[in-house]
Image (spheres, rainbow, N blue to C red):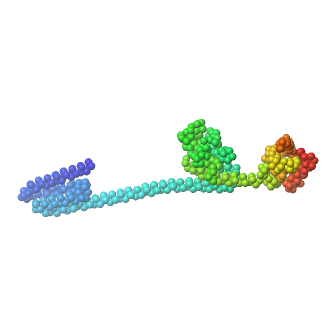
């Protein structure tokens, strides 16, 4: 504003001064007879006064100002020239003023071109800036998409690996491995499964991800798992000391942050998977989303493996005694026979029969007979051990085998079993029943060509014991 006011003021003084000067000239030279020789020179000098006026008008007001000033100057010059009888002055003024106007037009066009070029340059720069922003944004989108594709590929790999195996323990191990290999954050990863009979979480698998971190003992029934069981929703705690949902205690002071996801299938919670860290703010929401996705995949695989395990158990175990069935035992013994023959290992088979079982069954009924079978089966599993593959061979007969075991050790286990059986007394209908058993044992020989040879010799030894008095062991 100050610059514009100063320009107007300058223009006013110049214009006023010029008019005043020209007025004086008119008064002095109103008669040509006064100073006739000096008048043209003074008239030319007066004409030249308009030059700065036109220039300043063009600078301050642009072409309109220059046009207006030139027009006024032309009219005044014409009037003075005609009055002084000097038309040539008017012509000279017109030519001069025209030249000045053309100069202003040239300058204005040049300025207009410069402005247009600057505007075009600014527009181009804006386009370049917008393009750079779009490039940066597209790069960010591309990077984000690459991360998402990488995670998707990782989830596909996890789903494929978990879907291949039907082994329950293998699926649990693969679940822990999938979480720790994908989310390389935190100190400890734990997998909890729901015990339906006890209706509470139990710790199934865990992996220490940071051996240098302090280990914090957390109960499977802690407040975090209770929260998961109650809400059935993923849980993220960025800073446990500042989380209003959980009261501060010794655990919260030692534990910094954690993420956890429930394992849900068929709208039923079957467990939970959790990663904890002693550091606060160790996890982000994206980490929780990824853990939840892995948990959803693992839930289905764990359920399928559990169903398969339960079905397999029903198919290979006797429904009454819980021992392995004859078909499963024969298959395991056949494989052990081939291994023992190839490696030159010891292979021993034992056959057990409950003495006088038919009489017990006929006297006290089938329900009591079933009770005796289950009772003896528990003793058999306890004394023989799971490595012997204790099985129910049929009726009241039990069998087991040992590969790469010493013969004396097998006999010692068999004697402990016999002693535990004869030490038991069972009360039925106010009667005390003493149960005994007989055992036949056979060992692998060089001329055996089938596992059935061992079963045949053990059964033959058992028959000999039954025939000669029962309640003892015979090695064949």
| Front residue of this view, candidates 280 and 231 | 231
Q: Give coordinates of residue 5: x percent, y percent.
A: 24, 49
Q: Residue at x 11, y 57 (%)?
A: 39
The residue lying at 21 percent from left, 62 percent from top is 98
| Residue drawn at x 86%, y 55% as measured from the top left | 452
Percent across and percent down for residue 164 are 68, 56
Q: Is residue 107 left or right of residue 475?
A: left
Image side of residue 381 versus residue 112, left or right: right
* Image spot of residue 66 (x, y percent): 23, 58
- Residue 133 position within the rendered picture, expressed as x and y whole percent measured from the top left: 45, 55
The one nearer the camera, 24 or 368, is: 368
Residue 71 seen anywhere in this rendered image of the structure: yes
Nearest to the observer: residue 111 or residue 148: 148
- Kindly identify the residue that appears in the image at 79 percent across and 49 percent down: 321
Q: Quadrant of residue 99?
A: bottom left
* In this picture, residue 167 sits left or right of residue 228: right
All told, the count of numbered labels is: 0
Relative to 304, is 374 on the left or the right?
right
Q: Can you name the residue that lies furthest to the top here? A: 250
Q: Is residue 345 visible?
A: no
Q: Residue furthest front?
A: 429
């Amino acid at each position: 504003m100050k610059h514009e006011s100063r320009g107007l003021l300058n223009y006013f003084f110049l214009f006023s001064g010029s008019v005043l000067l020209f007025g004086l000239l008119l008064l002095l030279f109103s008669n040509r007879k006064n100073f006739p020789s000096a008048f043209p020179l003074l008239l030319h000098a007066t004409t030249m006064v308009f030059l700065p006026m036109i220039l300043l008008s063009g600078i301050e007001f642009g072409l309109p100002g220059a046009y207006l000033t030139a027009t006024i100057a032309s009219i005044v010059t014409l009037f003075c020239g005609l009055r002084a009888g000097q038309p040539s002055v008017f012509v000279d003024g017109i030519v001069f003023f025209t030249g000045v106007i053309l100069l202003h037009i040239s300058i204005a066009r040049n300025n207009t071109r410069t402005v247009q070029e600057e505007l075009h340059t600014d527009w181009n720069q804006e386009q370049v800036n917008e393009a750079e922003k779009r490039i940066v944004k597209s790069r960010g989108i591309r990077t984000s998409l690459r991360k998402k594709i990488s995670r998707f590929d990782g989830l596909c790999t996890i789903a494929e690996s978990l879907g291949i195996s039907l082994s329950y323990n293998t699926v649990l191990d693969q679940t822990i491995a999938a979480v720790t290999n994908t989310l390389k954050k935190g100190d400890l990863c734990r997998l909890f499964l729901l015990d339906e009979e006890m209706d509470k979480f139990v710790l199934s698998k865990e992996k220490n991800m940071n051996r240098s971190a302090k280990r914090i003992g957390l109960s499977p029934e802690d407040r975090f798992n209770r929260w998961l069981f109650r809400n059935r929703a993923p849980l993220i705690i960025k800073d446990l000391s500042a989380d209003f949902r959980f009261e501060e205690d010794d655990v919260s002071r030692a534990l910094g942050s954690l993420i956890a996801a429930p394992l849900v299938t068929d709208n039923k919670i079957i467990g939970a998977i959790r990663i904890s860290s002693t550091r606060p703010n160790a996890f982000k929401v994206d980490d929780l989303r990824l853990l939840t996705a892995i948990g959803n995949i693992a839930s289905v695989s764990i359920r399928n493996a559990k169903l398969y395990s339960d079905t397999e158990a029903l198919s290979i175990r006797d429904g009454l005694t819980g021992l392995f069935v004859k078909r499963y035992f024969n298959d395991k013994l056949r494989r052990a026979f081939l291994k023992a023959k190839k490696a030159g290992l010891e292979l021993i088979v034992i056959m057990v029969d409950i003495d006088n079982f038919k009489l017990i069954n006929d006297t006290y009924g089938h329900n009591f007979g079933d009770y005796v079978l289950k009772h003896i089966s528990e003793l058999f599993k306890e004394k023989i051990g799971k490595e012997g593959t204790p099985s129910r061979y049929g009726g009241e007969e039990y069998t087991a085998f040992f590969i790469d075991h010493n013969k004396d050790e097998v006999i010692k286990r068999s004697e402990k079993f016999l002693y535990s059986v004869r030490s038991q007394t069972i009360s039925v209908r106010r009667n005390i029943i003493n149960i005994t058993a007989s055992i036949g044992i056979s060992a692998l020989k060089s001329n055996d060509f089938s596992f059935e040879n061992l079963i045949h010799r053990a059964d033959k030894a058992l028959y000999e014991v039954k025939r000669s008095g029962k309640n003892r062991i015979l090695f064949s």
